[in-house]
Amino acid sequence: NAGVTQTPKFQVLKTGQSMTLQCAQDMNHNSMYWYRQDPGMGLRLIYYSASEGTTDKGEVPNGYNVSRLNKREFSLRLESAAPSQTSVYFCASSDLSGDSYEKLFFGSGTQLSVL
Amino acid sequence: GENVEQHPSTLSVQEGDSAVIKCTYSDSASNYFPWYKQELGKRPQLIIDIRSNVGEKKDQRIAVTLNKTAKHFSLHITETQPEDSAVYFCAASNSGGSYIPTFGRGTSLIVHP
């Protein structure tokens, strides 16, 4: 039981390049999230998916797209990376039933630098 | 939407002292208040949570209190140890509504041996 798995752990991009961050969870959770963490700014929600087949914008969605591929996987895509997207990205999952009700389980993070 | 303010941004204590981190929220419909701990270079992990039907919850050296009237909640750590050094995040959400948690900006707790 790996929990939430994110890849890659580190990535350096040049301005204008694209990339996709991958996330998968094995806890059968319905909800999945993408956050970015910047110094002094806490965790800000980029996009979330309440259930398979649905996605919604969070607080800071500009410059990102997401895909909920199936119940397990939720990917984040940067189409044209900008230096302002340099950040640490966390994927998370939760459920609205059982022992993990509303509790977020985070992946290990992706440190992204855009030059 | 919900707005969560967290104070202080940095807290430095001596080992064995108590530490208190405070958060306020704006949406009176919020009813779930978790706290996450993030050690350096690691992922945030839930350490304790409280729902609006109780005023206090304890788990060994940590406790959380909630004042619904004033719309604030606090994390209390007693007998601090160096391994308590981390960034702590509070959050608030509405189980009956969007359920998406809004986070505070975090408190960096430093426990000096």
Image (cartoon, coloured by chain):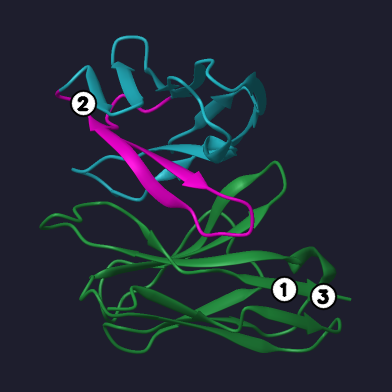
Chain colours: A green, B cyan
Type of amino acid at the residue the image marks with label 3? Val
Q: Look at mark 1 in the image and give the residue it sits on.
A: A112
Q: Do callouts 2 and 1 point to residues on the same chain?
A: no
Q: Which residue is the extreme one toward the right?
A: A115
Q: Look at mark 2 in the image and give the residue it sits on.
A: B52
Residues tagged 3 and 1 counted as in contact (Cβ below 8 A): yes
Residue displayed at 80% across by 84% down: A13
Could you say which disc has been placed on residue B2 in the image?
A: none
As helix, strand or loop, the secondary structure at mark 1 comes to strand
Q: Residues within 10 Å of mark 3 (few under 14, many from 20)?
A: some
Give coordinates of residue A95: x percent, y percent.
22, 61
* Left-right relation of B30 to A78: left
Q: Where does the C terminus of chain A fall, quadrant-wise?
A: bottom right
Front residue of this view, candidates B23 and B69: B23
Can residue B60 be seen from the camera position used here? yes
Give coordinates of residue B58: x percent, y percent.
25, 25
Q: Look at mark 3 in the image and give the residue it sits on.
A: A114
Cα gap from disc 2 to disc 3, whole angstroms: 42 Å
Residue under mark 1: which chain is it in?
A: A
Give coordinates of residue A58: x percent, y percent.
49, 58
As helix, strand or loop, the secondary structure at mark 3 comes to strand
Cα gap from disc 3 to disc 1, whole angstroms: 7 Å
Residue under mark 3: which chain is it in?
A: A
Cα gap from disc 2 to disc 1, whole angstroms: 37 Å
Bounds of the magenta span? B26-53
